[in-house]
Image (cartoon, rainbow, N blue to C red):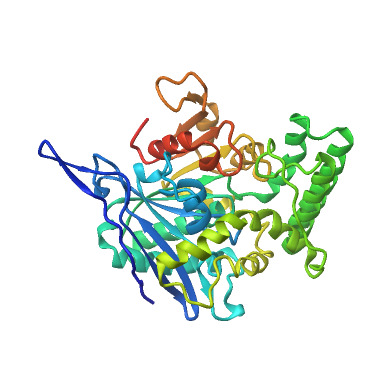
Amino acid sequence: MGLLRAGAALSVLLLAAGVVLRQPQEPKEVWGYVDVRSQAHMFWWLYYANNPTKDFTELPLVLWLQGGPGASGCGYGNFEEIGPLDKEMKPRNTTWLQAASILFVDNPVGTGFSYVDDCSLFAQNLTAVVSDMMVFLGEFFKCRTEFQTIPFYIFSESYGGKMAAGVALELHNAVQKGTIKCNFMGAALGDSWISPLDSVLSWGPYLYSTSLLDDNGLAEVTAVAKEIMDAINKNQYGLATELWGKAESVIEENTDNVNFYNILTKEVPEVKSDEQENLHLMRLYQRHVRKMHQSSLDELMNGPIRKKLMIIPDCVKWGGQSRQVFENMAEDFMKPVIDIVDQLLAANISVTVYNGQLDLIVDTMGQEAWIRKLKWPDLEQFSKKRWKALYVSPESTETAAFHKAYENFAFFWILKAGHMVPADQGEMALKMLRMVTQQQH
């Protein structure tokens, strides 16, 4: 198990009136593989923070975990959301590198440029995902000692939030035991699949309240949501995943194909007629992973980026194993992890929940529902607090979000954003990052 390193682009230093300024254009970056198990290879990509007045040692380190499972953080999160360049290779004005170093990782193994040599090695549950990530983080902090004392946060999106909760708890325990040396400060769960059932049960009411379902449609969605609830109550999680796919089809039929990631954007899923085997899983994969591997990003990652990285094996295609990653996690997919969030709060770890107003797949109503189920002793005090309006700048008069926090728990309601908050509302996402990492109030 070891870190392979390649490629580093260093910021230009300018001398102006005796003051060293860093030109925020080309951040220093390194990347490599960690063998998290024998024949299981995890790809990572680190960008050092790129701020004109602060060294990277004065800013936090953020680990970004993408969703799916099977969507690539090194691809999608990097080039579509928070990295220094967009997929046209143009600088991103709202890159998080202004406020943090970013560590992207393609997990679970098989995602993005990560790969397994044997199909039996795909992760099949959260425990396996967390175990692999702990091996990776152990190697990372051992090799990159400059980050051992820098405040470290895990930010996540979608299924990545479920993984983030599990990783955060295990990392906290490892730091307490002294087996990993890092300054772990907290986790941020963005549009996160923490309680699949609470999300599903809120789909009907949310769509109805936004005029995307009529009474008949609401009745149909409610009926299939009850089927999912019954399956989960009987611990039939594989069946619940199948029914989840059925529920999405019912919604599409009743809403003229609403986009699950942003209800104001139209998108029609494609399923090839020859894919009859595991049809429900194929549909789910097409909706929730394949959309993050669209042709332009696919061409970028398998073309120029692959050439730049120089360490991707010839046999590995970016995203080539992502469907298997998703299908291997199907049994685990609908399991809730509210109890893990409770354990994080009990351990006094900072937990932030943020959600996009226009997201359907993990709508805000569903997030609020599972939060009400927390056993956290301070929940009542948190609930009583009034939220505060947030603006992207002091000059702005448009409400960008609402925010509420108590002790070690915070919630951001991000307006005009769908499932991918940084892609839809980049300025507000950057402001949120600064607030969570205590650089701004």
Quadrant in which the C terminus is drawn? top left
Tell me if I can see residue 159 in this picture: yes
Q: Residue at coordinates 18% horizontally, 44% vertically from top-left?
A: 14
**Residue sitting at x 33%, y 65%:** 7
Residue 107: in sight, yes or no?
Answer: no
Q: Quadrant of the N terminus?
A: bottom left
| Lateral position of residue 84 relative to residue 366, left or right | left
Who is closer to the viewer here, 182 or 295?
A: 295
Q: Which percent across, then down, holds residue 275?
A: 79, 67
The image quadrant of residue 366 is top right
Residue sitting at the far right: 216
- Please report the residue visible at 37 percent of the width from the left and 41 percent of the height from the top: 437
Q: How far across and how far down the image is residue 72, in percent?
A: 53, 59
How many labels sit on residues? 0
Relative depth, front residue between 378 and 188 = 188
Task: Please state if 55 lies on the left or on the right of 158 as rendered.
Answer: left
Tell me where residue 357 appears, x and y as whole percent.
Answer: 61, 34
